[in-house]
């Protein structure tokens, strides 16, 4: 999925590849937070750029022989349990302790990100190419602008222009579904997923999450995994499911998603939300689709159609405009605070 875009630098979100212990509250002054970006931020960002771009391919291969929501459930339940075990061994069981409010917050964000967000992307990739799914997901920062506007933070004219440009791109990408060339249900599922992911990312900045970012990620994965289990069972995906019918490449793709897509990249993303400006994190919104489209073309021979290339370029341009305006605003705020 894709990161949110917002004009105000971010303070927080979930777990990460460092031992730093972030807090849940935003810094009083956003300028110092932006100025203290270290090597860990750039390493984590590179992981999110590349690994999450490749997860669309992993999902497409997984659902070749695995049921949709149950495969997503297996991914996040296994990853969540492994991460919780790591936290308990590395930091002690106390690191997993949370109060009801923190647990409820983590469960809500996990459901929005990993059930409504990721689960619906998996559903969509049953019927649309992985590259197209990634290009549609690139619209998440556009929804974030609208969410922040609804919260009282008036967007700048250039940001609104970026949103409108991105919506035009989504229209071009969706045109083949309207014309019947690709399954409309797949496009709709992924578009709904982008809204759910944006809501989850937005909420994670404004509600009280568990103090330990890795524990927070574990609880989110477990909550998201349970949500996917419930939907999968309600859809009857368990009927006729035989492990022997699942291909080796689907098993390997699922293992890749568990280890790299969830344990590595999701925790890196969650940690970035706490440790880096949200507008910087949002830049991977226009890197992931490029990685996904290239891998889909190279590995699965997915066609690079005119609407895909044109619509994708328009969406990425819109996202780039939104993020560039946001980052410019952040730098201006930092300079004013430094005076």
Image: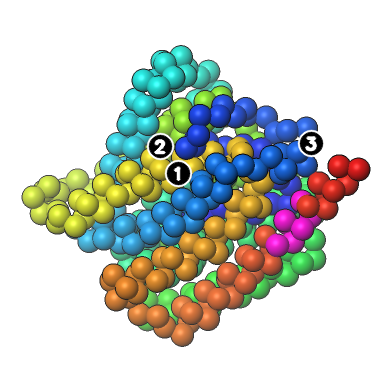
Q: Position of residue 275 (x, y in %)?
A: 61, 39
Q: Is residue 325 magenta?
A: yes
Percent of width and height locating residue 207: 62, 32
Magenta residues, as a range? 324-330
What quarter of the picture does the C terminus occupy?
Answer: top right
The relative height of residue 308 versus residue 323 in the rendered view (above or below) is below
Q: Nearer the viewer, mark 2 or mark 1?
A: 1
- Give the residue pinned by disc 1: 266
Give left or right: position of 70 versus 189: left
Q: Are marks 1 and 3 in contact (CB under 8 Å)?
A: no
Whether 287 is among the magenta residues is no
SS at mark 3 in the image: loop
Residue annotated with mark 2: 221
Secondary structure under badge 2? helix
Mark 3 = which residue? 29
Residue 116 in sight: no
Residue drawn where x is 51% and y is 29% of the image? 19
Residue 247, quarter of the rendered image: bottom left
- Which residue occupies 47% across, 68% down? 290
- Say if 72 sits above or below 156 in the image: above
């Amino acid at each position: 999925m894709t990161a949110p875009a917002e004009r105000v630098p971010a303070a927080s979100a979930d777990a990460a590849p460092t031992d730093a212990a972030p807090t849940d509250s935003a810094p009083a002054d956003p300028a110092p937070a932006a100025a203290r970006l270290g090597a860990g931020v750039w390493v984590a960002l590179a992981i999110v750029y590349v690994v999450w771009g490749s997860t669309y391919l992993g999902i497409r291969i997984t659902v070749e022989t695995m049921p949709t929501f149950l495969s997503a459930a297996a991914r996040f339940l296994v990853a969540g349990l492994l991460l919780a075990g790591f936290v308990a061994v590395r930091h002690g069981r106390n690191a997993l302790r949370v109060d009801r409010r923190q647990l409820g917050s983590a469960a809500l964000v996990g459901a929005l990100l990993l059930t409504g967000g990721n689960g619906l992307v998996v559903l969509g990739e049953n019927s649309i190419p992985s590259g197209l799914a990634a290009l549609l997901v690139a619209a998440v920062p556009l929804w974030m602008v609208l969410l922040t506007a609804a919260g009282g933070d008036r967007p700048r004219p250039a940001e609104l222009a970026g949103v409108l440009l991105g919506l035009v791109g989504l229209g071009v990408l969706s045109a083949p579904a309207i014309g019947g060339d690709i399954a409309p249900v797949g496009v709709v599922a992924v578009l709904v997923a982008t809204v759910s992911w944006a809501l989850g990312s937005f909420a994670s900045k404004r509600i009280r999450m568990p103090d330990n970012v890795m524990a927070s990620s574990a609880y989110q994965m477990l909550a998201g995994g349970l949500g996917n289990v419930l939907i999968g069972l309600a859809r009857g995906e368990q009927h006729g499911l035989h492990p022997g019918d699942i291909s080796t490449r689907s098993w390997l793709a699922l293992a890749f998603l568990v280890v790299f897509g969830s344990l590595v990249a999701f925790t890196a993303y969650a940690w970035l939300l706490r440790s880096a400006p949200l507008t910087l994190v949002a830049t991977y919104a226009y890197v992931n689709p490029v990685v996904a489209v290239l891998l889909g073309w190279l590995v699965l021979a997915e066609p690079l159609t005119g609407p895909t290339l044109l619509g994708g370029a328009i969406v990425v341009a819109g996202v780039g405009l939104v993020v560039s305006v946001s980052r410019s605003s952040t730098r201006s705020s930092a300079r004013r605070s430094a005076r």
